[in-house]
Amino acid sequence: MLASNLPWLLLHSRNRQSPFPGLGHSGSGSTLLGYIGIDTIIEQMRKKTMKAGFDFNIMIVGHSGLGKSTLVNTLFKSQVSRWSSGWGGEHKIPKTVEIKAVSHVIEEGGVKMKLTVIDTPGFGDQINNENCWDPISKYINEQYEKFLKEEVNIARKKRIPDTRVHCCLYFISPTGHSLRQLDIEFMKHLSRVVNIIPVIAKSDTMTPDEKNEFKHRVRKELETHGIEYYPQNEFDDDMEDKNENDKIREAMPFAVVGSDKEFQVNGKRVLGRKTAWGVVEVENPNHCEFALLRDFLIRSHLQDLKEVTHNIHYETYRARRLNDNGGLHPISANNTQESNL
Amino acid sequence: MTTNIRYKSRIPIKSDETPEEKQYVGFATLPNQVHRKSVKKGFDFTLMVAGESGMGKSTLVNSLFLTDLYKDRKLLNAEERINQTVEIIKHTVDIEEKGVKLKLTIVDTPGFGDAVNNNECWKPITDYIDQQFEQYFRDESGLNRKNIQDNRVHCCLYFIPPFGHGLRPVDVEFMKALHEKVNVVPLIAKADCLTPNEIKKLKDRVREEIERFGIKVYQFPECDSDEDEEFKQLDKELKECCPLAVIGSNTVVEARGQRVRGRLYPWGIVEVENQSHCDFVKLRNMLIRSHMHDLKDVTCDVHYENYRAQCIQDMTRYVKLTQDNRMESPIPILPLSTPDVETDRLIKMKDEEVNCYVIMGNITYTG
């Protein structure tokens, strides 16, 4: 083989700081003459992920009457929650907290998403609400266990079905004063296990000033109790993320209003709530922060929610499981746990 | 007064939405969200090249990735090579193009097929591949999975000499030893010593022998029905051209008024990137521009899973042998009490997957 004549191929050979330090490395990055086409790998990935589809599991928690189902329907512009009509039907308060999951496949722009809404009727509705978060905690851990079992299986599926809860929307009652004891207890117990996004429900009962004060007080309380809501400080990857997430953290909890009815305002049809003194427009940023919540949840951080669940919460669970038993016991393939799906 | 909190969302929000856009939830941006992270992290790809010395492997790699990985290489003469065993040498280079970072690792196998007695000369290579699988298996089963390094070999380019009449015994044995561990892509090296007719004959011969000996080379996945015609046509051409006949070059020559990579002969100039001269462009497109991701997927989903299943099965046997319920295994895993027949069947199932790709579609659930 002839010795290569390369001076004109390498325009300059700079010793660039390798983005992967610590690896045995004989060549330095060189400026390229011509186009290789590495950037097309993104398109390749895109095609594959589009074909495979996405899934997203969102849990809604809060005592009854806070407009949880309506809000979720408004977020996804479809009847995705358990109660698909307004006030029809009996809303019986169950004796214990139940976990009800409903899945739908929604499609937009060629992207298919299997959305699962996990409702928790009975939360906070009893006289004695002690430990009412236990069924919820149990459900979340069961999903982690399911995933772990599948992952450890000898013949595991290419795409393990993901039923883990990616996001928990916690509805805070708009009392205008402060968080209730139950709110704090719930979030304390669960913020290390799942991504919690607190929202202030039915915020059309507060004026803008009241809203701001309430939000401020809620944030202070969460800080005092060491409750880290999503996006968590410690998981910011780099400066860019940190700056963006800081702004979001300052604006949370979002004060929202949900509605599935449309009204005519200034010649446009808007989603809103009509009262004698005016129409509350759901998507109007001056009226409430629904649009901010939607953009945050769906348009920018959806994937991140899934990743934090997978890379952090699930890994924590897994590490705990592995440590607890010093290795896992042989489990037969038929031993599946019952879940409430 | 509500302060209008503005934050720069990753996707620009249109302030006045048309009625159609009001129906827009916004999760169509999901693919972009997914890829944003990948682009930030960068990609990696490990390519192995195997074949006798002097087949043009290094030159081809340089041509493919427009780098010079072998600057300081010393070529050995015949005497020095007598007692050589097959070595495994890794070269790593970081390439960035249009903001996308790729960490490319080339695994070289000097000494392969060079000795007088080449019995089992592929063993160091299969051992290396297994080692990478084992490393990954350990990491994956461990406690801290944050920064697992993926050194698994994603593709092996095997260089068949053009001088013979098809596959030689060492070619057949090598490919059979590796076809269930790595994606094998056979190439006809130094194709500029053959005329188009000879190339065609050789390709047909090699294809027929591959089938006859049951060698499972890397299969391109089927095109979707919704792909555009141009892509389907390219895909068809690619499949018909296998094994690809390639030429590499490190030198730039002047041809038809342009500066191109090529080889200058008294009777003409061979241009590497001329599709009528050789299949280099097809190889590059396939390897980098259309199938890189698929090569990685097949490595992860098929070859690695087979290795893993085999590993677990071996461990289960060992556990049964030692009659110990709580074995202090360095790898905390769940050995399943499935009978061996079942595991073998599972492994065979994975094998069949090499030839048909079924991506799990969405299942619609109602209520």
Image: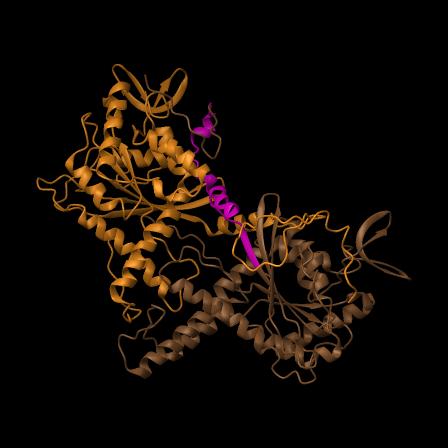
Chain colours: A orange, B brown
Q: Magenta span has A139? A: no
Q: Magenta span has B26? A: yes
Q: Specify whether residue B71 is in view.
A: yes
Task: Please determine whether, in this image, residue A72 is positioned above or below residue A340.
Answer: above
Residue A264 at what x, y percent from top left?
A: 36, 19
- Say how many tags the image has: 0
Residue B167 at what x, y percent from top left?
A: 70, 77
Which of the two residues, B156 or B27, is positioned nearer the viewer here? Answer: B156
Q: Residue at x 31, y 58 (%)?
A: A318
Instruction: Name the outermost residue toward the left.
Output: A127
Please provide the residue range marked out in magenta.
B16-45
Q: Residue at x 45, y 54 (%)?
A: B361
Viewed as shown, does residue B170 lie left or right of B196? left
Q: Residue at x 83, y 67 (%)?
A: B195
Residue B318 at what x, y percent from top left?
A: 36, 80
Q: Could you say which quadrant of the image residue B211 lies in?
A: bottom right
Residue B93 at what x, y percent from top left?
A: 61, 56
Which of the two residues, B61 or A339, is positioned nearer the viewer here? Answer: B61
Instruction: Name the outermost residue toward the right.
Output: B266
**Image quadrant where one finds the N terminus of chain B:** top left
Q: Could you say which quadrant of the image residue A144 lies in?
A: bottom left
Which of the two residues, B189 or A47, is positioned nearer the viewer here? Answer: B189
Judged by its main secondary structure, the magenta piece is helix
Q: Could you say which quadrant of the image residue A115 lies in?
A: top left
Q: Specify whether residue A90 is in view.
A: no
Task: Please determine whether, in this image, residue B84 is positioned above or below residue A244.
Answer: below
